[in-house]
Every structure is written in C-alpha cells, then in structure tokens.
Image (cartoon, coloured by chain):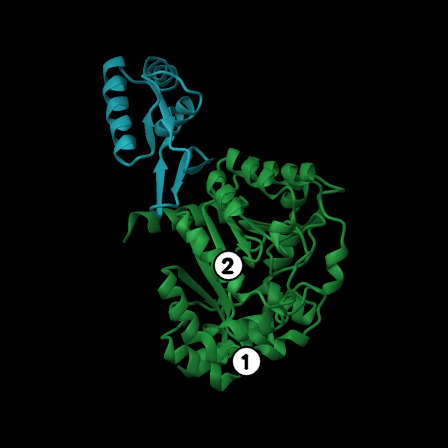
C-alpha cells in the first residue's frame, strides 16, 4: 500500500477518534454572480450579513488551534469578498492546505498572479457542459470567461481542477466535459448527487438523474461505489461530519458539514471551541436506536449514507434521503 | 547551519506527531516525537547546535548519537525537498 495513503488513513482515523476538525470548509459569502439551477443556497440567503475579516480570521485561528489542516474557502463566489487574499494569506501563515472553490468568472491574469503568490494549493472551478449548456445552467453567458480562467491558472502553474455535477440538464455533455478536461490537462471531479436547498426546499432535486440514466451513467463510466465489506452497524451509518469535518457559514453558523446545515452554534455568540466540543450533536448522531429504518433497509449495503442530505430532505438526522435511496438502488442493480 | 522549511508545504502537529503535506507532489509525511521537536526548532530558525541541545534536554540520548541522528534526519528532509539551507 502507498505510504501516503496509509498515513492519510491514519491521520483520518486519529482525527475522527479525537474529534479534531482536520477538514474544514469556510463559506465566505452566500453572494454569487451566477444563478446555478442546482445550487443548494436559497436566493434569499444572499443578503445575509457576513462575518467580518477579523471574525473569519478568528474562526480560522480556532480551527488551527484545534488541529485543522485542510481548509476550503467556498461560497457563493469567494472572489466577491474583497478580503479574500487577506484571508488566504492568513490561512497560509498558519500552514493550512488551502483550496478554493470558484465559478471562475472573476479570475483574471491579475487575480491568478495573486493566487500564485499566495501559495494556494488548489483551485477548483465549476463547469457544467459545453458553452450553451453551461451558460443555461448558470444563467449567464460566462463559459468563455471560465475557460479562459482555467487556461490562465494552468499557465501560472496553479493546481487546477474542473468540478461538475451530472444532472438531467447536462447528462449529454459529460463526454464533452471529459474532453475539455483532457485537452486542458486538468482533473475532472464529478458528482451526480444533488443536495436539497439549505432551507429544506426540495425543488432542485428534480434535476437528479432518473434510475435508468443513473445506471447507464455508472456503467458507462465504470463507477461503482459498492462496499462489500460494509457491516450492518452504526459505524457504517456515520460519516466525518461533526467528527473531523466542520463548516462555517458566511453568517457564522457552525455546521457539521457543508451539506449538513444544522447549526451547532454561531461564532458571534459562542467561541468556536465551545461549539465544537459541545457533545450534544455527537450524542444524537451515535444514538443507534434512531436508525431502525436504516438497519431494516434492504439497500443498507449499497447506501453511502449522508446525514446532511437526510436532514435537509426530511428534517431529521435519521430520515431517509430519496436521492441516496435512488443511488443505492441503482448500485444494487450493477 | 540553519534550515528553512519549504514555504509551499502545509503541516500540523497532531498529538505528538507532525504531519507534513506536500500538495504539489501529493505526499504526506509523518514525523515522530523526536522529529516533531526538531521540526519545531527549525520553525524557530534554531541552529544545528541549538537543536542538539534541545534534543538532549528532552530525550535520554548521548551527544554523539543525537548529532549523528540529526544529520541523517536533515539529509532526509533535504532529499525530500521539505527543507532547504537557509545560510
């Protein structure tokens, strides 16, 4: 086994056991200059008052003190924050691995130069298809700008990846996206799961591929997430969220994960440390008796359960996500 | 001789060990307790002589052994481009 892989596993398990927020996502803003059809952030959130530079730095420092190592700056569109480079520089001064999630529309040569100087470890840019599909998907004519941004980042030698989510609206573009990533020589990170909006609005889930198309997509792309060694126990139902993964929202809410908008507390009213070490959430998560529906489910072995998705779709930590049930069913058919 | 940590690396002390992430080459390195102490000294820009003193203060080891082990450790870090000569 690769040494780095073994160490990653060791680090993951240790941080999980000790509840070290090794992995963190700091959502800097809910503001965005695009309107992606699948986005989990409700439009009304865009006007929320955001944490100040000092408040965000305090959060980053707290995560650092507790042992955090990997930090993602996300949004909305993080480059809409005027203090973005100040925050990146601060995180890098604390020796974090820093990754940026962006839609690429604001990345010019000048910005790329600053990204390079700030020693950001990776920039992940979202693209959803060819020009017409992408522009339709994000609600604006920006495809050329985004593609140019990726080329600029590559020219500057910045580690760059394309991120996409495959839906009913862009399934036919997946091959084109693969070709784009190959041509640009960048990694293509693909998802096929859509999260309901943070306020529980499930309307965007209609974009999710139907079982037939999902099965075809998995087979064509040789994707198989079956875990045959999965045991029917509590451990198999839990994930990193709240154990060694944390997310802080633009308004200061501390979530177990970006996909799990259950506020453990808010850094404006409590310290990050107090919020993180409050055991109530973990006690709820490990209450085995509440997962009866999961333990009696025939799809248990095929389900990569995400408590966040269950929560936003059903309002309960222990509910069943229709999206995940669909994916599990499809996996059971492969 | 002083050493400078490669500024591109990310690292964190977790428990008694230090994990170093080299994202450019997709490597993760781990330093044990002694390695972590040396790493902390390097972060402070201490000289080899001072680092040996710190090792002797914290661990039950002979001077010659500490000096030899430190030399080997530094060579390994240099080989992996984790540190560079500072002067």
Q: CA distance from mark 1 to mark 2?
A: 21 Å
Q: How many marks?
A: 2
Pointer 1 local density, CA inside 10 Å: few below 14, some 14–19, many at least 20 = some
Does the rendering let one see residue A129?
A: no
The chain in green: A
User: Which corner quadrant of the image does residue A277 belong to?
Assistant: top right
Image height of B57 relative to A135, above or below = above
Residue visible at 44% across and 21% down?
Answer: B44
Residue at left offset 40%, top offset 65%: A181
Residue A15, given in percent of the width and then of the height, sits at 49, 45
- Mark 2 surroundings within 10 Å by alpha-carbon count, few (fewer than 14), some (14 through 19), many (20 or more): many
Q: Nearer the viewer, residue A136 or A13?
A: A136
Q: Is residue A117 left or right of residue A202?
A: left
Does label 2 lie on the same chain as label 1? yes
* Left or right: A328 as drawn, with respect to B54: right
What numbered label is drawn on residue A125?
Answer: 2
The subunit letter for the residue under badge 1 reads: A
Q: Farthest bottom residue?
A: A212
| Chain cyan in the figure, letter | B
Which label number is shown at residue B31? none
Q: Position of residue A146 (x, y in %)?
A: 52, 61
Q: Secondary structure at mark 1?
A: loop
> Eyeballing the image, is A96 above or below A294?
above
Q: Is residue A220 above or below residue B69?
A: below
Where does label 1 land, which residue? A168
* Element type at mark 2: strand
């Amino acid at each position: 086994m690769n040494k780095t892989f073994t160490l990653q596993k060791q680090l993951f398990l240790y941080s999980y056991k000790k509840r070290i927020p090794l992995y963190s996502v700091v959502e800097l803003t809910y503001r965005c200059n695009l309107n992606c059809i699948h986005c989990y952030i409700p439009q009304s959130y865009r006007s929320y008052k955001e944490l100040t530079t000092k408040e965000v730095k305090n959060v980053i420092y707290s995560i650092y003190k507790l042992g955090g190592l990997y930090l993602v700056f996300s949004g909305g569109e993080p480059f809409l924050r005027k203090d973005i480079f100040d925050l990146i520089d601060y995180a890098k001064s604390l020796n974090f691995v820093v990754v940026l999630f962006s839609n690429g529309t604001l990345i010019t040569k000048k910005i790329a130069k600053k990204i390079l100087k700030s020693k950001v470890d990776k920039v992940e840019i979202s693209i959803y298809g060819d020009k017409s599909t992408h522009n339709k998907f994000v609600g604006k004519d920006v495809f050329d700008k985004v593609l140019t941004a990726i080329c600029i980042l590559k020219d500057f030698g910045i580690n760059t990846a394309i991120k996409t989510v495959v839906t009913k609206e862009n399934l036919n573009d997946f091959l084109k996206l693969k070709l784009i990533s190959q041509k640009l020589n960048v990694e293509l990170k693909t998802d096929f799961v859509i999260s309901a909006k943070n306020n529980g609005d499930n309307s965007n889930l209609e974009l999710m591929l139907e079982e037939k198309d999902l099965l075809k997509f998995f087979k064509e792309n040789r994707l198989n997430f079956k875990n045959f060694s999965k045991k029917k126990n509590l451990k198999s139902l839990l994930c990193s969220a709240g154990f060694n993964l944390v997310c802080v929202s633009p308004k200061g809410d501390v979530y177990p994960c970006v996909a799990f908008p259950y506020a453990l507390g808010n850094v404006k009213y409590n310290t990050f440390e107090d919020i993180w070490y409050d055991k109530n959430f973990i006690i709820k998560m490990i209450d085995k008796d509440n997962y009866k529906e999961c333990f009696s489910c025939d799809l248990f072995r095929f389900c990569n359960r995400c408590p966040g998705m269950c929560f936003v779709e059903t309002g309960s930590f222990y509910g069943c996500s229709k999206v995940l049930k669909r994916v599990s069913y499809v996996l059971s058919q492969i | 001789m002083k050493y400078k940590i490669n500024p591109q690396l990310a690292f964190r002390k977790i428990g008694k060990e230090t994990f170093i992430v080299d994202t450019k080459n997709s490597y993760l390195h781990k330093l044990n307790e002694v390695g972590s102490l040396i790493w902390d000294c390097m972060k402070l820009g201490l000289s080899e002589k001072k680092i040996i003193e710190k090792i002797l203060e914290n661990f039950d080891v002979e001077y010659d052994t500490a000096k030899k082990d430190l030399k080997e450790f530094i060579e390994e870090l240099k080989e992996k481009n984790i540190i560079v000569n500072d002067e």
